[in-house]
Amino acid sequence: MKNKSIVLTGGGTAGHVSLNQAIIPTLLKQGFDVHYVGSKAGIEKDLITQAFPNDVTYHAISSGKLRRYFSWQNFSDPFKVLAGVTQTMAILRKIKPVIVFSKGGFVSVPVVMAAKALGIPVVNHESDVTPGLANKLALPFVSHIFTVFNETLAHLPEHKATCTGSIIRSELFQGSRERGLARCGFDGTRQVVLIMGGSQGSAIVNNAVRENLHILTPQFDVIHLCGKGHIDEALTQTEGYTQFEYVTTELADLLYASDYVISRAGSNSIFEFLALYKPMMLIPLSAAKSRGDQILNARLFSKQGFAVVLEEESLTTETFAKTFEELLGRSGQILDAMANATPPKTPEEMVDLILSFQKQK
């Protein structure tokens, strides 16, 4: 009987998991035994085990963190990575997958290294304009890397990189405006603004939003995904304002209920907003707090007419209000640009591309 096992990996943020979530249903329909290798306590564990409790086997390994700043842990984490390689090799020997698909994040590094050592093909995926550190480290070990942006190809070896465009999970298109409004206690008589500060939340974005509630709530209903531990109890009874720490399966409903989105500029998220025709105001994570990937993502979307952008360094109560006013004024133009955008690939098309590199028995 032909082996139909596949291993997926990626973690650290929701963005390093969402594409895997998108393709898992297709892999299951095709009869694959799907395994996921992630960290012991990362966000990927919760996202995968909650979404696919009975269909995907989750394997936790040791992994370090790829830091761009000095920390004494930088000296011990390489040993965690080596331990992760050893653990992954044992897992892969048992599963014998036809291919490993990696979405990046620090937990993926020992996985791709182990797969290469065992002669198992590895396919990577990069969502941002420039490759992340994990995917850079993985390059020598992968058979191929797919990208979302054409601009990314300039940073990768020509012989092992292809631009696929965005891939959107099918369940995103199954959202319901009615369910989303009911979840928030809104009656649907006003337009809705959805605010997302990323999977970890953002204090600076949260503060700007709350300082502008007196401007927003008289005209709009506001859904605020503020991050774990960032609920403001003093505002829980504010009319027209609903806070959530984080949502998973309900996100599609909240997006369908929304007319505008204010968000960070992670690649997966902004392409989802584009696919659902949501005019967006992007506040990318600053270069001081990241490698600048969100800034590049946001600027490209602005250039293509899909978004207005407010740099985090310029974010104040006043600039937030002014940029949101700009979003409202340009929403018609933004929707026109979105209507002419290249449609995303389906999960089925992405699975076919991945499997074209599989190990042949």
Image (cartoon, grey):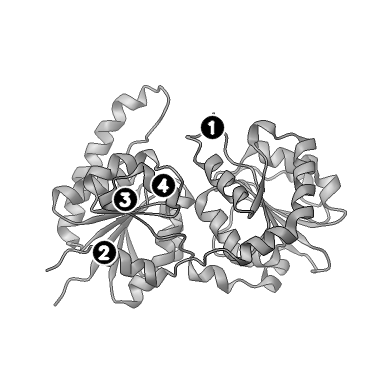
Residue 207 seen from this side = yes
How many tags in the picture?
A: 4
Q: CA distance from mark 4 to mark 1?
A: 18 Å
Residue 361 lies in what quarter of the image? bottom left
Q: Residue at x 57, y 64 (%)?
A: 275
Image height check: is 85 above or below 279?
A: above
In this view, the mark in front (1 or 2): 1
Residue 66 appears left or right of 233: left
Disc 2 marks a residue whose amino acid type is Ile
Q: Position of residue 347 (x, y in %)?
A: 41, 69
Residue at 70%, 73% in the rendered image: 178
Q: Position of residue 254 (x, y in %)?
A: 65, 63
Q: Position of residue 150 (x, y in %)?
A: 43, 52
The disc at residue 287 is 1
**Would you call the spot at circle 1 few (<14 residues within 10 Å), some (14-19), or many (20 or more)?**
some
Left or right: residue 67 versus residue 228 is left
**Which numbered circle lies on residue 31?**
none
Task: Identify which residue, 238 or 332, lies in the foreground.
Answer: 332
Of the residues under marks 3 and 1, which one precedes in the sequence? 3
Tag 4 residue: 152
Report the mark closest to the observer, 3 or 1.
Answer: 1
- Note whether residue 52 is visible: no
Is the residue under label 1 in contact with that under label 3 (CB below 8 Å)? no
- Nearer to us of marks 4 and 3 is 4
| Residue on which the image places disc 3 | 60
Dot placed on the residue nearer the N-terminal end, 2 or 4 = 2
Q: Which element carries disc 1, helix, strand or loop?
A: loop
Identified at 20% across, 51% down, the residue is: 115
